[in-house]
Structure formats: C-alpha cells, structure tokens
Image: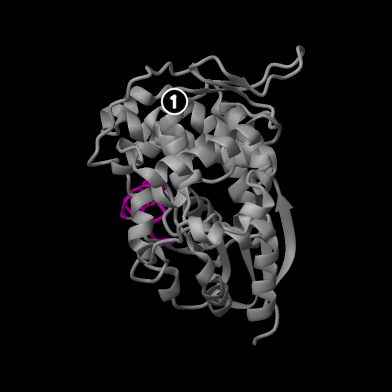
Amino acid sequence: MSTPELELPTQRVSVDPHRWPDVAQVPAGPRARVAAVVADRLFRRAAARLGVRVEYPDGTVLGVGPPDRILPRMIIRRPTDFARRLGTGGLIGFGESYMAGDWTASDPVAVLTPFAAEMGSLIPRPLQRLRRFVVAPQPAEERNTEQNTRSNISRHYDLSNALFNTFLDRSMTYSSALFDELPAHWDALATAQERKIDRLLDAANVGPGTRLLEIGTGWGELCVRAAQRGAIVRSVTLSEEQRTLARDRVAAAGLSDRVQIALLDYRAVDGEYDAIVSVEMIEAVGYDYWPTYFRTLDRLLRPGGLVALQAITMPHDRMTETRDTYTWIHKYVFPGGMLPSTESIDVTTRALTSLRTVDRLQFGEHYAETLRLWRERFVAHADQVAEIGFDATFRRMWEFYLAYSEAGFRSGYLDVQQIVFRKENQR
C-alpha cells in the first residue's frame, strides 16, 4: 500500500537549522557546483535504466517505460539543490534531499528498490576506484569502543518509548517477524513476532532451568517468553528507555524473580550460560569489534551450549568495499553500526572461537513485510508523532529510513538470518 504523495511546494520547506544543520543548508561554493554537474549526469544516467520515472519541474521525464507498465514516480522538486547535495554528500546527500523535500515519491519503496538492487553498479567502475578520496570515513567518536557505544545506542533507542509505540505492535518487538504467510497483515504481526522469538528459544533449547543470557534486551518480550518457559534470564542493554519499560513488563508478568535486566556493555558480562540469544544486536557492534563480540559469546557459553543469533546481512563484496564508509544511516539512524556478511560471520567464528554453525534460516522477504507494516503505521500516526515532539523533518527522516530499509530487503540486497551455533571444544 502506497502512502498519499506529499505535494511539496517549490520553495524551501521549513527546517530547523539548529536541529538539522546539514538539511537546512544546501552546499554552496565552486566545489559544490562542479560536484553537482557530475552528480546530475551520473544520476540521470542511472535513473534512465532503473525502471523509475523521474520527473523534473521543467517537464523533463527520465525512465519512460513500456505502455503496459506503470513505473514508480520520483518527483524532483528542486533539481539544483538535489544535485548539489548528491554531488557533495553522495548517498548521505540523497537522503538529506528527501528530508529537505528536494524530491518526493508517492511510493518511496518502489522508487528506492531498483536503486538498492543496483547498488554496486550505480557508479561506473572506473570512478569507484576514487571512492576513498571522496567518501567520508566513519567518525572516530562513533567507533563502538566501550566509551562510545552507550552514546551510539542512546541516540537511537532512547529517542522515546512513545515514538516506538506509534508503529510497533503490542509486543514492542523491533526486529523482523516470521510470518505464517505472505503478504502479511497488521493483525498477524504480533503473532509473527512471537513465532520468531519462540523459534530462537527453541533453537537454543531454552526450557526449565536454562541459564539464558540475552544480549540486547529490546523492550522485554524475549525475556518474558523465556522466563515463562522456566528459564533464568540475564539480559543486558545500553538503552535506559528500553531497560525501564522491559523491567516494567517483566514485573507486570510476575517474572521479576526469574529475570535480571542490567544496563551493561556485552563485553563486561561475566558468568557461564547454557544458552545465549541475541536478536539484531550484532549490527550495532561495528566491524572492528566482531572478533570481540564472538569471543565474548564463546567465553560466556558452557561447552555444548547454544547461541541463537538473528542478524541482518549484506553481500560480502559490498561489505568489504563500504566497511569504512560513513553513510546516511550512520549519520541519522544508527551511529557506529555495520551489517555483517554471512562469510564474515562464518570466518570470524571458525577462526577465533569454538562456535560452529548448526542451523541457519534466511527470511529476508519477511523483514520487507515487517518494515512495510511499521512504515504504514508510522505514516498513519504522523500527528501523534508530532504531538510527542518530533518535527516534520524527523518524520520524513524516519519514513525514509523505514522505506530505505524495506527497499534493501525487497531487492535482495539485504537479508536476515537466524543462525544457531554450538560450542564444541574448549580452545
């Protein structure tokens, strides 16, 4: 279901320059003008072959399809601003131009999916060799050291529990659901989240008396379901907002004697556990710290124990090419994050730990549906989001984030997996 197109005026949309300085200010100067010319040519070249109808204010239309096919519409409202942001900031500028209203679409996912599918070839191969000279690296202050990680996590997960409540289902689960059938409906989402959690707990053999460690608490649904099975649960998070609500939910379920939730970095966890479950937390670890993460799992797990990991993955070649790149997602949504590839997980665990893969389920199309449901609900509750205190620029940013992510899964560029490891011999 597409959302009604936001008809934007050609004049600049009001953007708070203190809250959104790089969105409020269009790049200027000779370098920005030259970069805009190059970016405009590259964009028009790419758009013409991607199956997207790009419309300009002067009547120019790119990507005219066959008569029997309706192409998704990308409407460029301010071509000069769009080109300058794109030329100066690359994909960061592309996202910022959406936030500023330089371009819009009635169905942003349909527009973004062809771009995601061709992510590796949007820029001609000869120019890709210049990548390291023009693309900014991730800031040192956002590397996931023990000193920085809490701030990185807080910038996303501590925005407001009320914000997440506007688009998540009653389980407050912020990761891919596992549906019984596709396409999915909103009424099926909570049950699909429970199915996902139960599959992880089953895979880790969690039952009465199991000493379970959860790395990344979320808002407590997995804690509750594990404790209801009779497990003794220790869960760690770096989000104060999540810990507060998760503790309240555990107490309301009468399970406080079985669940401990701590504000603690995964590297500082001690003890020994029969099972470890971690749902979409590895994405926040950072490339440089994947060895530490998996060594920590290995250290904490008893011999013969099981780890059930849910992880978003990306193609290995793209991961290696972009692992040092500062992206729009880093800047506005997940500072310090990095998606692993299947190969990077396999190589790291085999080389550095006693963890060996015993099961794997891939279900990326389910994440696309999960994100669609979240996005539709978020857009439908835009007035409520505004009442909480989030301005129009934030709302466009969040819609773009959800659409951008959904497009990644729709195109097959991204996948999500449940991977189960068994700890074999002590190293």
Determine if the magenta segment contains residue 200. no
In the figure, residue 70 lies in which quadrant?
top right
User: The disc labelled 1 sits on which kind of residue?
Assistant: Val
Given residues 70 and 305, the one toward you in this image is: 70
At x 37%, y 17%, the residue is 9
> Given the current orientation, which residue lies at the most extreme top position?
67
> Given the current orientation, which residue lies at the most extreme left position?
18
Q: Which residues are magenta?
A: 240-259
Task: Judge left or right: residue 349 versus residue 27.
Answer: right
Given residues 204 and 256, the one toward you in this image is: 204
Q: Position of residue 324 (x, y in %)?
A: 52, 63
Given residues 80 and 335, the one toward you in this image is: 80
In the figure, residue 164 lies in which quadrant?
top left
Callout 1 crowding tier (Cα within 10 Å): few <14, some 14–19, many ≥20:
some
Quadrant of the snapshot with the C terminus: bottom right
* Total marks placed: 1
Quadrant of the snapshot with the N terminus: top right
At x 54%, y 30%, the residue is 373
> Given the current orientation, which residue lies at the most extreme bottom position?
427
Q: Position of residue 381 (x, y in %)?
A: 39, 25
Task: Judge left or right: residue 412 versus residue 160.
Answer: right
* Residue at mark 1: 379
Identify the secondary structure beneath mark 1: helix
At x 58%, y 77%, the residue is 298
